[in-house]
Amino acid sequence: MTPAPLRSQVRAALERAWAAAIESGALSPLPEDAPRPSIEVERPANPEHGDLASNLAMKLARPYQRSPLELATLLAAKLVRDAAETGSDSPVEAVEVAKPGFMNIRLRPDALAAMVDGILDTPDAWGRVSPTGPRKVNVEFVSANPTGPLTIGNARGAFIGDLLSRVLEAGGQDVTREYYFNDSGAQIDNLGASVAAMKRGEPVPEEGYQGDYVSDLAAAVPDDLWAAATVDGADTAAVLGRWASGRVREGIESSMERLGVHFDVWTSEGRLHEDGWVGRAVERLRENGHVFEANGALWFRSTAFGDDKDRVIYRSDGRPTYFAADIGYVTEKFSRGFEHLIYVWGADHHGTVARVRNAAAAMGYDEGAVQVLLYSWVRFVRDGEDVSMSKRAGTFITLDELLAEVGVDAARWFFASRAATTSIDFDIEQMRGLREALERGDHEEASKLPVYYVQYAHARIASILRKASESGLAPAGSVAGTLGSGPEAALARAIVRFPEVVEDAVLGEETQGVTAYAIELATAFHAFYRDARVVDPDEPERSAARLALVRAAQVTLARTLGLLGISAPESM
RNA sequence: GCGCCCGUAGCUCAGUGGAUAGAGCGUUAGGUUGCGGACCUAAAGGUCGUGAGUUCGAGUCUCGCCGGGCGCGCCA
């Protein structure tokens, strides 16, 4: 069991210091109606400002009508006293009050050592945090209909959904990855008609699909299926479409597995109708008085919840809309016991967010339990030119092709290091160049990509540990007493930050901070390695302690990369 | 027209209302009789699109404007 993150420990110490100030009469309790400022603790950008810093005194200046510096001085004294009390588990060694009213806090080396020892004792627990309560969460993503292979247009959603799932899992939540698809209807009939046309050597219909995958499908149609599909009175397009979409769906599943994404549940839109979920959801809306009929169609009164338009559920010809399936799906998901639903959608779907959340509210669900994460478009570039594509015309780059060119780890890193909401450029050619550099052994070129730089740090440590083992040296059981200063102190400070980084990722539901930290930790290790000789048979005790610290760095690098679904190689 | 997102270094992008705005790449100048030089050190490079406002403090919050993307179906 590793101790609580140091940031949390310091926050708790500040809480105690504030309470002590009130108890001693130095401060009065805040009035009930006054907003209670949250206690913020952060890593200062400037290392001279200590390990952690708090702006609590500045936050309290207004409610207390006192100067921030005065309050900081008061709280700092209480913090130091708290740490000095016998039995105190405060990690605070010293507090310095700075200009506007910051409290700059230096941590005790043995608090760092306790964290590092915890990593060595229980490496699998390292980085597991629980900033929120445990929840059963459904993350639905990709959800492209099986009319063709996944393309680079689906790439960002795939990685973002999986990264989000991994982060939530690290935060102690029970995540189900889910893929929603429609394998019936006009699109699928068009696919079937295209396959049939291809097989007959006829031109593909206007609304049909082009591309090599269609002719591959046509060539793979089993004889008995073809016979059944073309017998008199058979709906050729529908029969072939169902078969083809099944094949395509399997291809999608194996593509996703190739990039390390495993879906726990695949849900078809047709099943939602067949199993009565849509009907029951509509009934529920009707009972709550949120539907009405107009022009022969059935509508959901979405405007009552702030939407700018009401939305059709059943068309005037009685056929359900896509939205009808959506609301059935919401009830079906909640029926499986999920407390929170996350939809990962492209930004072009932002117009549908309101109606789905409104429908959930209208059916009596907590609207806050239905969350939509929108990600922006990726502009794929090759030699400075936009890569344009059209699925219908068959001019597209598949996800498989992209990953074959740039590699899964590099692609994962790329998407993990950028916020979902910003639109980004992806230079396929540049990424491919770096991957090829890696393959032909041009290490200097390859490591221009930060992911390789980080992986190298991990592999380098593995090499050091092997070397040590050959020299008869093993990591010590504890680093206590070795982190006071020097290279050890700097590396330990970087290592120990990890759970805080995970917490931030969980709370922000994003991974940019994780990739930034990975670079920081790798850099800290390389700097340590430069300054400290790790394997030194003449200094077995010091070597053992340094090996332990390096081992903790390796575990942390592996956990950091693991959080992103990126491999941590033993050698490169 | 209305709605949502974006605008930060030459390029690609980070930046929970806090201290001197960061990283990678690129550019420039250096570093190895020791464990993987796939490494390290340093420099140059910014009116944070723009104008106002909010406050002790704004890249971050509010409003206007400019520029870019997306969406406004009884399509999916």
Image (tube, rainbow, N blue to C red):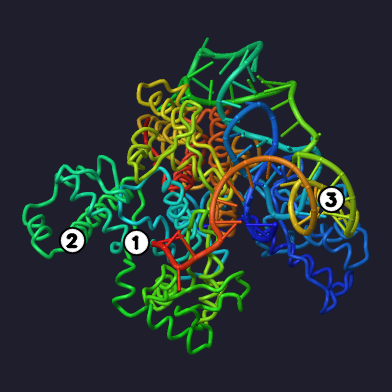
Q: Which residue in the protein does label 3 denote?
A: A97
Q: Secondary structure at mark 3?
A: strand
For the point 38% across and 58% down, the residue is: A143
Relative depth, front residue between A389 and A362: A389
Mark 2, other Cα within 10 Å: few <14 / some 14–19 / many ≥20: some
Share a chain, discs 3 and 2?
yes
* Amino acid type, residue under disc 1 in the picture: Phe
**Residue, far bottom:** A287
Report the disc number at residue A397. none
Mark 1, other Cα within 10 Å: few <14 / some 14–19 / many ≥20: some
Disc 3 to disc 1, how far (Cα)? 58 Å
Disc 3 to disc 2, how far (Cα)? 76 Å
Q: Chain of mark 1?
A: A
Q: Chain of mark 2?
A: A
Q: Which residue in the protein does label 1 denote?
A: A181
**Mark with earlier residue (3, 2):** 3
Mark 3, other Cα within 10 Å: few <14 / some 14–19 / many ≥20: many
Q: Which residue in the protein does label 2 denote?
A: A239
